[in-house]
Image: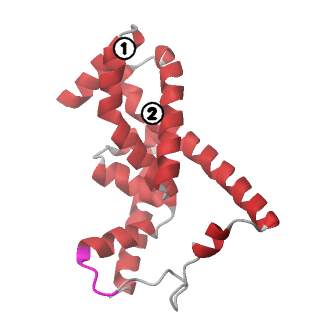
Amino acid sequence: MSRSTGEVLDDWLVLAAQGGEADAFEALAERWHRRLVAHAYRRLSHAEGAAEAAQEAWLAIVRGIPSLDDPARFPSWAYRIVDRKAVDWLRRRRRQRAMDDRIGRDPRLRSQAIDPGPDGLPAEPEGLDPVDRLRLALRQLPGEQQALLALYYTEGRPVRQIAETLGIPEGTVKSRLFHARQHLKSRLEDRP
């Protein structure tokens, strides 16, 4: 299987970064930062949290890149790190929210409440174009389904690489992609 120019460039940048070349690491960060932030955002649906998770992931990547055995595994390795940092951010946020609820001093929590529509989902604004309807439906999917669909369709990652990233069998990825598509389809059909 031939590899794309971008993949070969990433391999070279990883090897150079492992050799201590700061410029190579900077170029790797330029190529990957937006993708890692976008991946974190798909997991968290929170821009600030995504930026924070990606920043923490880069710290872990800097520390761990010398021990990465196969440069071709950088994408799945980096995505796994972002996943862990996103989970860490969610845990911190939940703890903070629980504390805020107990103390009752955070007015932002009350102002962020969304009145649900009759189906229990947030009410959809009138007159959305099809692309906006798709984006809204995607945001309403569980985070794992959002991430799978984005890795496959937006990032163009093959099933094999997604399986590697998530640490699950390829068949499970295919099954979860199928269910994510079905869930998305039902969301789109439910809303005119």
Q: Residue at x 81, y 65 (%)?
A: 102
Amino acid at the residue labelled 2: Ala
Q: Which mark is residue 107?
A: none
Picture quarter with the C terminus? bottom left
Q: Residue at x 33, y 87 (%)?
A: 126
- Residue 60 higher or lower than 141, as above or below: above
Provide the major secondary structure of the magenta segment.
loop
SS of the residue at dot 2?
Answer: helix
> Any magenta on residue 120?
no
Report the residue marked by disc 1.
22
Q: Residue at x 30, y 46 (%)?
A: 155
> Any magenta on residue 129?
yes
Kindly indicate the quadrant of the structure image that contains residue 28: top left
Badge 2 crowding class, 10 Å Cα cut-off, few under 14, some 14 to 19, many 20 or more, is many
Q: Are the two marked residues, 1 and 2, in contact with CB atoms closer than 8 angstroms? A: no
Of residues 1 and 43, the one drawn nearer to the viewer in this rendering:
43
Q: Position of residue 127 (x, y in %)?
A: 28, 86
Badge 1 crowding class, 10 Å Cα cut-off, few under 14, some 14 to 19, many 20 or more, is few
SS of the residue at dot 1?
Answer: helix
Amino acid at the residue labelled 1: Ala
Using residue 101 as the reference point, say whether residue 182 is left or right of it. left
Report the residue marked by disc 2.
78
Using residue 9 as the reference point, say whether residue 64 is left or right of it. right
Kindly indicate the quadrant of the structure image that contains residue 98: bottom right
Of residues 33 and 192, the one drawn nearer to the viewer in this rendering:
33
Magenta part of the protein: which range? 126-130
